[in-house]
Image (tube, grey):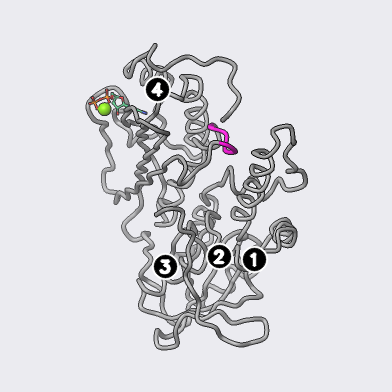
Amino acid sequence: MSKETKHTSISTLGEFGLIDRLTKNIQLKNDSSVLGVGDDAAILDYRNKQIVVTSDLLTEGIHFNLMYVPLKHLGYKSVAVNLSDIYAMNATPKQITISIAISSKFSVEAIDELYEGIYLACEKYGVDLVGGDTTSSLTGLTISITAIGEVEKDDIVKRSGAQANDLLCVSGDLGGAYMGLQLLERENEVFKVNENMQPQLGGYDYILERQLKPEPRADIIAAFKKMGIKPTSMIDISDGLSSEIMHLCKNSGVGCSLFEDKVPMDLQTKQMAEELNINPLVAALNGGEDYELLFTLPLDDYEKIKNDPDFTIIGHMTEASEGVNLVTTGGSAIPLQAQGWNHGK
Ligand code: ADP
Ligand code: MG
């Protein structure tokens, strides 16, 4: 658990006192947020826009381990991954609600830290916290987040629009979050054996950040608008590239050829993989939690993105009858396996 200077029991504040403490500084930023925390329900006004809504539920011990995840990072990441789903619809997030169940092992200061991270993400992505619920739990911490966003009807991008011959593209690089997790778990095991051991995390800032502080790709959605691009299909990479490709193919009724040597990976991802004797491609395909955007584009858009370092073309869509294949560096096609990253779901 994170280091705390004070440990005030939540019972000294009570539920209402805690909610008040956590929400008293909120200043609503968005026109669509008409009424926030403080009544039985929030009021939103979206006029002619379409509204997208998504939820995530995170449970201690299943989705996060407080042995090595600071609460502030947990708050930030909880919001970030939820917003990623909104961006994956080509939409803009505007509001979130946060519901928490907390056991008595958490102090008021600990929950303050969690909310510090939550508000940091809200600030960065221009989102209003407009409500939630607070309750107690017998064992650990559970966080449920709902995000609400807006999009013009014609701009919505679903998982289902990919066509044969479309380019398959991804933002950023893959496998880093998984390798960051492996590093944190390795150091945690060492610490459990000997509490005096200092964690050896040096030189791996990038993959640690990928695991502890992922950023949803709001910038990519903005870039699409600027470049006049509307993907034919899109999904965010929460469970690993393989699994997300399978979703696009299934929902769109197409097949796909993914080229092994095109999958973008950072140097630190490869270095950590080598150190731990893991094939970095496996981390990219099945690791998950990278929160990059995977999308398809008509061939005609090739010129628009070919020189953009934010995007990598990793394959192309095919007829469904050709299947979903990984084309290896050697040129052979292997059916892609969707292992996903089954963190208890
Ligand atoms: P109710 O009894 O109607 O559920 P609550 O007393 O739980 O109302 O909540 C009061 C207000 O505080 C509501 O606006 C609710 O959305 C908000 N709220 C409750 N818990 C949280 C939380 N953990 N984070 C943010 N807002 C919260
Ligand atoms: Mg309530």
Q: Which of 321/62 is in front?
A: 62
At 38% from the left edge and 66% from the top edge, which residue is drawn?
159
For label 1, the residue is 264
- Tag 1–tag 2 contact (CB < 8 Å): yes
Of 45 and 294, the residue lying toward us:
294
Q: Residue at x 50, y 43 (%)?
A: 64
Q: Which residues are magenta?
A: 67-71
Please identify the quadrant where the C terminus is shown: bottom left
Dot 3 or dot 1, earlier in sequence:
3
Nearer-N-terminus badge (4/3):
4
Of labels 3 and 1, the one closer to you: 1
Q: Amino acid at mark 4?
A: Thr
Magenta stretch, main secondary structure, is loop
Give the labeled residue for mark 2.
170
Mark 1 and mark 4 in contact (Cβ < 8 Å)? no
Q: Looking at the image, tell me whether mark 1 or mark 2 is earlier in sequence order.
A: 2
Labels 2 and 3 touching (C-beta < 8 A): no
Disc 4 within 8 angstroms of ligand 1 (CB)? yes
Q: Quadrant of residue 69?
A: top right
Which callout, 4 or 3, points to the residue nearer the camera? 4
Q: Is residue 94 above or below residue 91?
A: above
Label 3 vs label 1: CA separation?
Answer: 20 Å
Q: What's the residue at 59%, 48% (across, down)?
A: 211
Mark 4 or mark 1: whose residue is earlier in sequence? 4
What is the three-letter code of the residue carrying label 3? Ser
Q: What residue is pinned by disc 3?
A: 233
Element on which disc 2 rests: strand
Which residue bears the numbered disc 4?
A: 23
Residue 160: % across, % down: 35, 70
Q: Nearer the viewer, residue 49 or 263?
A: 263
